[in-house]
Amino acid sequence: MAALFSTRLGRQASGYLQDKYKQARLALGDITPAELLVQEATNGDPCVPDAKTLACIADAAFDIDDYWRIANVLHRRLGSVHDWKEWRPVYKALVVLEFLLTHGPEELPRDFLPTMKALRDLRGFTYIDDKGFDWGASMQRRADSVVNLLTDADRLRDARHRAAVGIRSFPFSHAADHHASLLPRFPRHLVLRLLLAALLRQPFLRLPLLPKR
């Protein structure tokens, strides 16, 4: 019982320190909320970024400054493709990149064409976890999907069209649009700040202001 209590206490202390570290980085201004969010979404934790997180990253990518910050994080993650110990951040970066290709800025594919060789190398990744899940096959499918979107303009156009139709027909699938519809009197950039604050578990007033669009 004492060991269990000690473990829980250690986790709480670790979470508290991590939150304080995030607050300090945001306060110092060396990172934006969107950049921190994409770093969290592509870290080495087992969980894969959810739809709300992906939608928030895609929405932030339409701001030019956050676009390059998000792209740089993804480039760094994908630069570790030959270090199989870092496979999880690479896989999660593929998840984010695939979503951005269909929901983010139209110029994004051009900036990720140089990563084509690294993406193709992922087709050789193999790993089955202790529960029997084939992460290698999942990585290969995800890499194939990203490569096809980057190299086939017609496929990318169709995927973006389907994504746009899906957002219009089912607005709750897009976090920013859903919250904007609930708060119609709030400017969109403030709605995005609210979403980032919730996802990062940071006080709204401590997040730096996002530029209006």
Image (cartoon, rainbow, N blue to C red):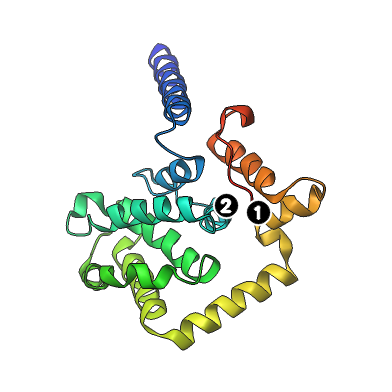
Foreground residue, 84 or 196? 196
- Residue under the point 40% across and 22% down: 14
Look at label 1 and name its amino acid. Ala
Q: Quadrant of residue 40?
A: top left
Q: Is residue 131 visible?
A: no
Which percent across, then down, holds residue 39?
40, 45
For label 2, the residue is: 56
Q: Are marks 2 and 1 in contact (CB under 8 Å)?
A: yes
Cα separation, mark 2 vs mark 1, equals 7 Å
- Residue under the point 46% across and 56% down: 67
Q: Earlier in the sequence, mark 2 or mark 1?
A: 2
Q: Quadrant of residue 122?
A: bottom left
> In which quadrant is the N terminus drawn?
top left
Q: Secondary structure at mark 2?
A: helix
Mark 2 packing: few (<14 Cα in 10 Å), some, or many (20+)? many
Look at label 2 and name its amino acid. Cys
Which percent across, then down, holds residue 136?
29, 64
For label 1, the residue is: 175
Compared with residue 32, is residue 69 higher up or lower down, i.e. above or below? below
Q: Secondary structure at mark 1?
A: helix
Which percent across, then down, holds residue 70?
42, 52
